[in-house]
Amino acid sequence: MKKYTIKLIMCSFVAVFGLAGCTNLDEETFGSLSPDTYYNNEAEALSSVVGVYQSLSQVAHIGDPWRIAEFGTDEFIVPGRASGGWFDQNNIDIINHTVAPTNATCGRAWRNIFQEIGTANAVLESLQASPNSANLKGLVAEVRALRAYGYFYAMDFWGNVPLVTVARIDPNNLPGTTPRAEIFDFIETEMLAAIEDLPSITTVNKASYYPRFTKEAIYGLLATMYLNAEVYTGTPKWTEAVAMCDKIISTNKYSLEAAVVDNFKSTNEQNSTEIISSFSISPSQNAGNNQFILYAQNGLDKLKYNLPFTPANGYSTYQEALDRYENQDVRKSLIEYGPQYYLDGVTPLKYPNGTQLNIIAVQSLISAEDNEGYKVLKYTPIGTSWSGFNADNDLVLMRYADILLIKAEALFRGGTTTIPDTPLNLVNTVRGRSNASVLTSLTLKNIEDERARELIWEGHRRRDMIRFGTYFTGTWAFKTTQTATFRGIYPIPQEQRTANPKLEQNPGYPLN
């Protein structure tokens, strides 16, 4: 059983802090903590900080922000089923790149993200107001980084967003939209400041400190931001992206796991050599949950994996994603397609009528049959402990393979490094782990495709496709036409603009 401190005190956060998040820009938000009587020591303060981590986990994984990071790409589809299940026109509109300001999925994603930001603001104010604040610098740094992470997602999805750094918003002075480049600068400033007071992976006991942010976790986000800086600000920052990767590499504390799937096992989270940042999950202790298996797998996988529930057969991937892998690539075996068998690889997995399950590509976006839609076995159910349909696999935020691929791309695009390596060698290092063939030369398309293979369903694909341009120029399955470039950011939700008329709609979208 997992017994990490950050999870055991989750109930304390819920009881003391309540609903501190800001979900609407016209909503007054107060923290319920009393700095004069609370935070006598780090453990008490951590009981609030853990709630911000928990809120970010719902932004980065499983929740609607993660879904809108994957919908609209060539690796994620949730078709409506012929049985009537899973049909949602909001999701189909994202898949088809026809999102409107009234899209409910995008609206929920906005609320999720700004709730995380609002919670961080309230906790940060309480930490800074505490009489014991001088001894809480590390926790203040964590919360600043957590808030900046929330703003990273807001900036990535919507571009120009309101910048709010207080727990209570004056309803008579609502914030307007801040330009995307200024949000970028704010995130960068906050992250660099947080790094100063965060410990390095080289100085902490990983077993006891896990899964809290280290300097290296923040270097990783900065590397991602710099890799996409030209999209966000108009100015590329390739060398800066390389520099952040080099700071992580130079610790000599990270290496690739023997297999990709090892990163996503319930039994290998705390001791992983590859995971840089993650969220600790223990549904049995009411400390988060992992529902990938519930949402993704075919119902017959209940028999295959001896699950205590029947999966809902929702999340699927495309033929295009499957075809990116060579047959000998071990990563291809983590996608369920074709005739299905029990774990022995011999016994057919059959419906009650005796027909073997044969998973095929999605044929219909609105009335798919039960066997349509390839399944990505992201978080393996093997070795997992369950609380109902909730798994205890920790949710991975960033891992070392991503850092190697970021460095490869940034170098290829013109960045320089203090730790000599070649883009080709870095990409082949990642490919070699999964028995993919050795590349003898490299193109930008090779790099994009390798990121798609390695990081499937980890929330990067939309961002990557926008950076490479394929989000706009590419076609696949049900997306048969090119996409206008203004759709590289989502529309500001109409409900938010109704509540706060000072929010300006993004270009290209209707104002009403």
Image (cartoon, rainbow, N blue to C red):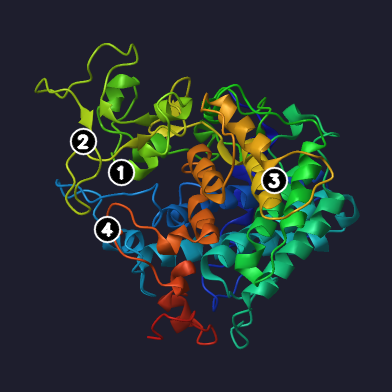
Name the residue tied to disc 2: 371
* 472 vs 77, nearest the viewer: 472
Name the residue tied to disc 3: 407
Q: Quadrant of residue 204?
A: top right
Q: Residue at x 45, y 34 (%)?
A: 378
Q: Residue at x 34, y 57 (%)?
A: 475
* 410 vs 441, nearest the viewer: 441
Neighbourhood count class around disc 3 (C-alpha, 10 Å): few under 14, some 14–19, many 20 upward: many
Which SS class for mark 2? Answer: loop
Distance Cα–Cα, label 2 vs label 4:
19 Å
Q: Is residue 150 left or right of residue 66?
A: right
Q: Is residue 182 above or below residue 38?
A: below
Q: Disc 2 vs disc 4: which is toward the camera?
A: 2
Q: Amino acid at mark 1?
A: Gly
In percent of width and height, residue 116 lies at 59, 59
In percent of width and height, residue 146 lies at 68, 55
Name the residue tied to disc 4: 88
Which SS class for mark 4? Answer: loop
Name the residue tied to disc 1: 314
Q: Amino acid at mark 2?
A: Asn
